[in-house]
Image (cartoon, rainbow, N blue to C red):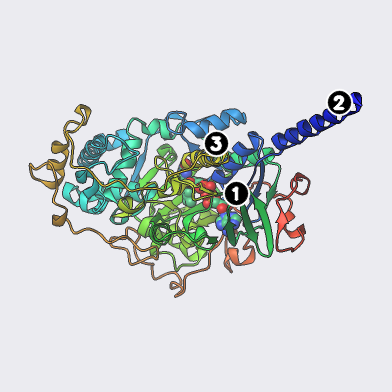
Amino acid sequence: MLSGWLRACALVMVGLVSASALAVDKPHTAIVVGGGLAGLTAAYELQSKGWQVTLLEAKPAVGGRSGLAGSEWIGNAKAQPVLNQYLDRFKIKPVPAPEFVRTPGYLIDGEYFSAADLATKQPATAEAIKRYEAALDDMARSITDPENPAANSTLFALDQINVANWLDRLSLPATARQLINQQIRTRYDEPSRLSLLYFAQQSRVNRNVDDRDRRAARLPGGSAVLAEEFVKQLKVIKTNSPVSAINQDKDGVTVKVGSVGYEAEYVVLAVPLRALSKIQLTPALDAQHQGAIKSTNYGWHDQIMLKFKNPVWDSKARMSGEIYSNTGLGMLWIEPALKGGANAVINLSGDNARIMQAFGDKQLVDQVLIRLHAFYPQARGAFTGYEIRRSSVDPSTGGAYLAFGPGQISKYWRLWEKPLQRVAFAGEHTDSLYPGTLEGALRTGQRAAGQVQDLAAGKSFEPVKVAPPKAPEAAPKESGGIGGFFSNMFGGSKPEPKPAEKAPEPAPAPAPSPAPAPVVAPPAPAVEPAKPAVEPAKKAATKKEPAKKEPAKKAPAKPAATHKAPAKTDAAKKAPAKATTPAAPATDSKN
Ligand SMILES: Cc1cc2nc3c(=O)[nH]c(=O)nc-3n(C[C@H](O)[C@H](O)[C@H](O)COP(=O)(O)OP(=O)(O)OC[C@H]3O[C@@H](n4cnc5c(N)ncnc54)[C@H](O)[C@@H]3O)c2cc1C
């Protein structure tokens, strides 16, 4: 009798232990939406903590936005610490950049100048650029905490002003102003569309980072090689899976791809803001988030790689690195032999890209070639073809990457950093320090992965509150005094500007508008007239000259030849078209 009772107790105990062991072993689940570097990082970090992760990517391949460069310039660990950590972890070896490309160069009316040349041959321009840099540094130093740039009402006022207004105050000579405009629009967006506070904050973040640190190495294969490493690690990736809706309730989330539903405990939403506007969220986002989706400014950048049989530029110029042109060529650099030829990559940015938006790819290339040919008469004869990537006409991004416009820091600062119930946000646009960069994308993937783990551990996140600005404080000693900077800027001795004196710019609309000061001249009469309609969004296209048809029309879904991340099994297509299917098991994912 006693032994029977003991046996029964033992069986109950065994049952309890194995039930609790099962409960402990059951992994947490998450769905990551978007297979850019932010989403890939979030998925990788969660999976490495034992989570069961499904990554859903709309396009046929992961990797998302990234430059056209097949051998991308990257910063060292000082400039891009997280990027360099992942390169080390995956044993990806960047190639150190030669010294002459580590500082910017200039192309003035077709003549190449290194920074050193400029000082001796164009001293007035060099001097004006120095004056601008000193004024910018002065402004950057006035920001004590780049995570909280609008810390006082004086700094808050800078958010109402655009960068072009500030540059006007510096009264720079024409060539210097053109080169400076070119640098700003290449890195961010058109100066007239940028919040001065954002520009100052970014300068503060990079204040102790030398140009030499920013262009310290080349990454052979471009940022696609990093995406490929993440892909190798991840167990479940479903490409061709555009997410259309996300429903959350107290028990979990259901993510819809067409009629298929994926279920998990949490979601990391790692898509750009315009793409987010096409995903139906239940419960819906509040007015502030919806306003941010609609109006947050994205910088416009088109990249064109012109291919030549041989270098058509002066071989002594050693043109490479970042070269800012004072004419319509934008910023350009020369791709080394890694791409197998003499290739010039041209970045058309800001309003230079906006005014070209109605042009077809070939027309756009023609315009750029005409300008290059004016300086290098062999250009047309040696031209063999091009590749192009036009983020300015991609409706899923509405531009290339985040560049806050006037008034937008005041409204949307760090808005996307906080999860909403079971959804955490990632993507370059959600980073406060390095938006618009690979570094920012990677950082936000890590942050979002940490946040969903915190949520699973029972932590709750307060909704974002925009703190009201305080009255200006005494400036930190190292800033040299806030009064000095503002006196210089506003031409008076008062430490605080009167915002009313400066006509605040309205927040720039996402749709393009006529360029205030185009550097690219209007289309030359020799080429076809611009098409009246905006071309549909295209992925990068490769084209041989002479081109008869638009290349992207022939191959709309192919990623840039230089950015191949391996496509994964298109498991979403195989999934039964039930209203709800469980998050995919690991077996239907990787090939
Ligand atoms: C022209 C250009 C030049 C650049 N140059 C540099 C540089 O020199 N240095 C640097 O550090 N950074 C540079 N960047 C920025 C850098 O490339 C980006 O910051 C980074 O790639 C963004 O990664 P992400 O993951 O945030 O977004 P993305 O790469 O855009 O990833 C988002 C992904 O979500 C997918 N998606 C969208 N909607 C859905 C949906 N409904 N369902 C599923 N998936 C969806 C998209 O297809 C995409 O793959 C450049 C960017 C551009 C455009």
Give coordinates of residue 111: x percent, y percent.
Answer: 34, 45
> What residue is shown with label 1?
35
Q: CA distance from mark 2 to mark 3?
A: 67 Å
Q: Is residue 484 in view?
A: yes
Residue 271, how many percent across, how many down? 53, 53
Query: Dividing the image into 4 quarters, which one contains the N terminus?
Result: top right
Query: Within 8 Å of ligand 1, the CB of disc 1?
Result: yes
Label 1 element class: loop
Identify residue type, mark 1: Gly
Mark 2 vs 3: CB contact within 8 A: no
Point out the residue furthest to the bottom here: 532
Give the secondary structure at mark 3: strand
- Mark 2 Cβ and ligand 1 under 8 Å apart: no
Along the horizontal axis of the image, is 258 left or right of 295? right
Q: Amino acid at mark 2?
A: Leu
Q: CA distance from mark 1 to mark 3?
A: 20 Å
> Measured from the top left, where is residue 482 in percent x and y?
17, 36
- As drawn, 327 above or below 199: below
Query: Earlier along the polypeptide chain: callout 1 or callout 3?
Result: 1
Residue 6's tag is 2
Q: Which residue is mark 3?
A: 219
Mark 2 or mark 1: name the one nearer the start of the chain: 2
